[in-house]
Image (cartoon, grey):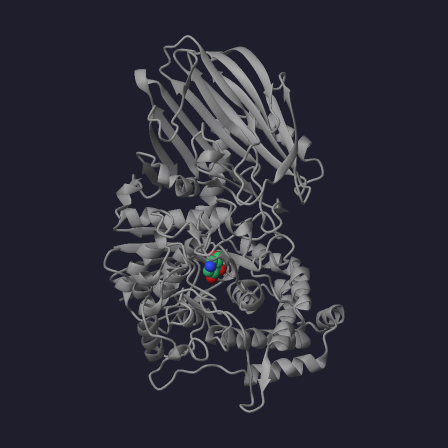
């Protein structure tokens, strides 16, 4: 499929859509999402409702309405609009062809703009953004041009009849209109968690004279029927939607009304200016410039934008959802995606956000301990799907057999244990990138020790082999459940134990009091440290065999050797789930996503010969059924100097959402929305892949290589508070230290050391 079937590229920041196809509503709404880490307002037209997947997902509003899926709630929509001209409803409703609409989305500032034209040249133009200056605000400028009619009626207000994926989350609606202040609100609470959610609206007609306003209360909504006279053929309405919940503060109603009033005092243009200033600051460090291909440039920024708006940077107690705030799929909750895919970009740019992401894991230790205890283990077994409290949200029956209709008992929750050592891994990387020892002492060490404890309780000693094994688990490749000794997990386990030991001894030597306090707090015994050491030394690590191949798990090579294409032909129903217990992939070597290759992206401990052998072996056996997969293959391809293959994976990964290449429903479960891990993966693909950035105890290093399709790549990094620019083209690799740095920047390029004083630069010929 061509990208022009979906969108046009105006420049490196703007995407244009010239016609809206009904079958693309789910993913357009996600792609054109206005967001800020607090809320996500889907890219829908003003006149659309839940039937067109209009939604505004609000962070920290977890609610279990159907007894199975605890997910975030959607706010009532305060930008709801119905326009009547001379008594006739006018809008662009799918399938009705009353208007022609063009959409523009600006990824620099997250600005959604629609322009629709109807008969007699009547034009509806509307622009909105979710403010980064006030996270509770969505500002909208709605205008109708070329009006020749007599009677214009606008139905505006707050519509509480929202799109819910699993059960209805809001109840007990109350609302009020204050005519003196041009403000109204709707208050409701979530059915199970009893969170109060307040949505307010303030509005002003900048052009157009209000003739009459009639209030219409419905069970879940409050509307105003406004008759307006056009002014010089125009009506311009400035609106502010404000959202607060009782998890934000004690009196969400008062806060919403205050913000609504303040926004009304300002103007759309001012609010936009303040919002843009925040984005400008962010892009100074987070933008990646790709020269030589405008489409790719836009795709890169699309992904960076989505990784940024998915992260609740304002809080240290909230997760990055696997679908961000683009819809309720995956419950607005964190998977291992958060540490391994979303985090890396922040580690080298907005380090405060990186810290918050990791602190979230500290605050959810209780949930992780609870899960471990319930399953008979010690320490912290982090939830596979983790919401506010860190308790396991992943239901035991995740997918269903679409042929029989029976539920499938997936074991993502109980057996996919690598999420815990993945978090330890991320703490180590954060420490290397920032040298923030305070974080490690005060937060990270407790996580590291509790994860080590869990791993200690989870491994089995095999006395015949005199080594430790991990049996009955799932690696990253989710099609093969109940396997033993998944290479990725075993290596990650050893790594996590070693880092726990490293910081234990560091604290013992340098911060003994802190260590004593922590030991007392978590009741940590010397004997446990000895055991961690023993397990780290004796854990079974599947090694490259005579063909340099690492077996993904015990017995993997004995499975039927085939490809995803062959398995496609075996499907009875296209929506069938391929994995456990009886899916088409289970008894074959076809894997869902990078697994041994995922080990290589995280650890640089194998030779290029081993990398190449495994890449060549696993690549044709990987379905890339998960959006996490292509970017990881891309990084390894770049390490092997196979830049064109990296580029092919870029195309696969960067366009997953832009061209809707991944399924929105699998095994009967809705998993649509923005693939935030793939979005974060694009940063890795360019920075760790093309530029070859690595960070380890020796420091930073680069091993650059660039594909033919791009003339140049440019980005900025922040390493231990030293900022610098990286420019890579086919001939030159350039590092430029920021003049404001306080220290010398040290870095290796192709294993040669460079020391850059503030303001200095180096150009290395490739
Ligand atoms: O965490 C991933 C997993 O690796 C593959 N299935 C989807 C999850 C959420 O993105």
Tell me which residue sits at (64%, 28%) in the image: 257
Tell me which residue sits at (47%, 47%) in the image: 282
The quadrant holding residue 737 is: bottom left
Please indicate, yes or no, whether residue 594 appears anywhere in the rendered image: yes
442, 675: nearer the viewer: 675
Q: Position of residue 359 (x, y in %)?
A: 61, 58
697 to the left or right of 737? right
Q: Position of residue 268 (x, y in %)?
A: 49, 27
Residue furthest toward the left?
708
Tell me: residue 697, above or below residue 733: below
630 to the left or right of 71? left
Q: Position of residue 59 (x, y in %)?
A: 58, 45
Tell me: residue 191, above or below residue 653: above
Q: How many marks?
A: 0
Quadrant location, the C terminus:
bottom left
The quadrant holding residue 133 is: top right
Residue furthest toward the front?
404
440, 302: nearer the viewer: 302
63 to the left or right of 15? right
Please indicate, yes or no, whether residue 207 appears anywhere in the rendered image: no
Tell me which residue sits at (50%, 27%) in the image: 80
106, 274: nearer the viewer: 106
Q: Position of residue 167 (x, y in %)?
A: 58, 43
């Amino acid at each position: 499929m061509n990208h022009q079937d979906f969108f046009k590229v105006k420049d490196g920041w703007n995407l244009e859509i010239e016609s809206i196809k009904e079958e693309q509503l789910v993913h357009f709404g996600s792609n054109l999402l206005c967001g800020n880490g607090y809320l996500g307002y889907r890219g829908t037209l003003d006149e659309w409702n839940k039937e067109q997947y209009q939604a505004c997902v609000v962070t920290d509003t977890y609610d279990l309405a159907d007894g199975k899926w605890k997910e975030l709630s959607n706010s009532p929509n305060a930008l709801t609009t119905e326009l009547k001209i001379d008594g006739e409803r006018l809008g662009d409703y799918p399938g009705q062809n009353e208007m022609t609409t063009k959409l523009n989305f600006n990824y620099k500032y997250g600005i959604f703009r629609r322009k629709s034209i109807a008969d007699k040249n009547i034009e509806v133009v509307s622009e909105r953004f979710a403010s980064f200056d006030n996270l509770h605000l969505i500002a909208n400028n709605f205008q109708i041009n070329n009006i020749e009619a007599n009677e214009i009626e606008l139905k505006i207000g707050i519509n509480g009849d929202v799109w819910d994926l699993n059960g209805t989350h809001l109840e007990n609606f109350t609302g009020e209109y204050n005519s003196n202040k041009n403000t109204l609100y709707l208050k409701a609470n979530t059915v199970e968690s009893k969170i109060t959610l307040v949505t307010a609206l303030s509005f002003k007609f900048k052009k157009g004279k209000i003739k009459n306003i009639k209030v219409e209360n419905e069970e879940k909504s409050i509307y105003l029927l406004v008759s307006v006279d056009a002014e010089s053929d125009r009506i311009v309405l400035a609106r502010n939607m404000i959202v607060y919940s009782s998890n934000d503060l004690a009196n969400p109603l008062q806060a919403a009304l205050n913000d609504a009033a303040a926004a009304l005092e300002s103007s759309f243009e001012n609010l936009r200016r303040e919002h843009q200033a925040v984005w400008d600051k962010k892009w100074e460090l987070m933008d990646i410039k790709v020269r030589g291909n405008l489409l790719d440039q836009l795709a890169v920024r699309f992904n960076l934008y989505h990784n940024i708006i998915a992260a609740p940077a304002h809080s240290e107690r909230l997760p990055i959802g696997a679908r961000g705030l683009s819809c309720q799929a995956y419950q607005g909750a964190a998977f291992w995606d958060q540490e391994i895919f979303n985090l890396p970009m922040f580690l080298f740019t907005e380090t405060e956000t990186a810290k918050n992401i990791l602190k979230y894991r500290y605050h959810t230790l209780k949930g992780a301990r609870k899960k471990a205890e319930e399953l008979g283990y010690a320490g912290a077994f982090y939830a596979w799907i983790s919401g506010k409290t860190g308790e396991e949200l992943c239901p035991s029956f995740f997918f269903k057999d679409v042929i029989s209709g029976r539920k499938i008992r997936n074991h993502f929750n109980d057996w996919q244990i690598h999420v815990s050592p993945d978090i330890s891994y991320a703490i180590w990387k954060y420490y290397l990138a920032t040298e923030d020892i305070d974080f490690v002492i005060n937060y990270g060490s407790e996580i590291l020790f509790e994860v080590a404890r869990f791993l200690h309780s989870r491994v089995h000693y095999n006395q015949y082999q005199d080594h430790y094994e991990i049996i009955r688990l799932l690696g990253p490749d989710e099609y093969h459940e109940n396997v033993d000794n998944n290479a990725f997990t075993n290596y990650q386990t050893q790594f996590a134990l070693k880092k726990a030991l490293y910081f234990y001894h560091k604290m013992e030597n340098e911060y003994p009091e802190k260590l004593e306090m922590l030991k007392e707090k978590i009741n940590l015994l010397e004997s446990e440290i000895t055991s961690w050491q023993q397990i780290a030394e004796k854990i079974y690590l599947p090694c490259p065999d005579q063909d340099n191949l690492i077996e993904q798990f015990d017995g993997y090579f004995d499975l039927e050797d085939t490809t995803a294409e062959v398995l496609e032909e075996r499907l009875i129903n296209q929506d069938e789930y391929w994995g456990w217990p009886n899916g088409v992939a289970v008894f074959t070597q076809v894997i869902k996503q990078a697994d041994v290759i995922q080990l290589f992206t995280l650890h640089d401990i194998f030779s290029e010969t081993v990398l190449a052998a495994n890449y060549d072996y696993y690549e044709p056996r990987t379905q890339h059924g998960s959006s996490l997969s292509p970017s990881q293959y891309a990084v390894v391809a770049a390490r092997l100097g196979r830049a064109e293959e990296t580029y092919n994976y870029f195309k696969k990964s960067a366009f997953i959402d832009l061209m809707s290449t991944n399924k929105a429903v699998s095994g009967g479960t809705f998993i649509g929305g923005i693939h935030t891990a793939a979005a974060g993966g694009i940063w890795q693909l360019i920075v760790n892949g093309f530029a070859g950035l690595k960070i380890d105890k020796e420091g930073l290093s680069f091993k650059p290589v660039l594909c033919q399709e791009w003339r140049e790549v440019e980005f900025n990094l922040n390493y231990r508070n030293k900022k610098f620019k990286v420019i890579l083209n086919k001939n030159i690799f350039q590092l430029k230290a920021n003049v404001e740095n306080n220290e010398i920047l040290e870095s290796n390029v192709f294993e040669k050391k460079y020391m850059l004083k503030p303001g200095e630069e180096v150009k290395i010929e490739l």
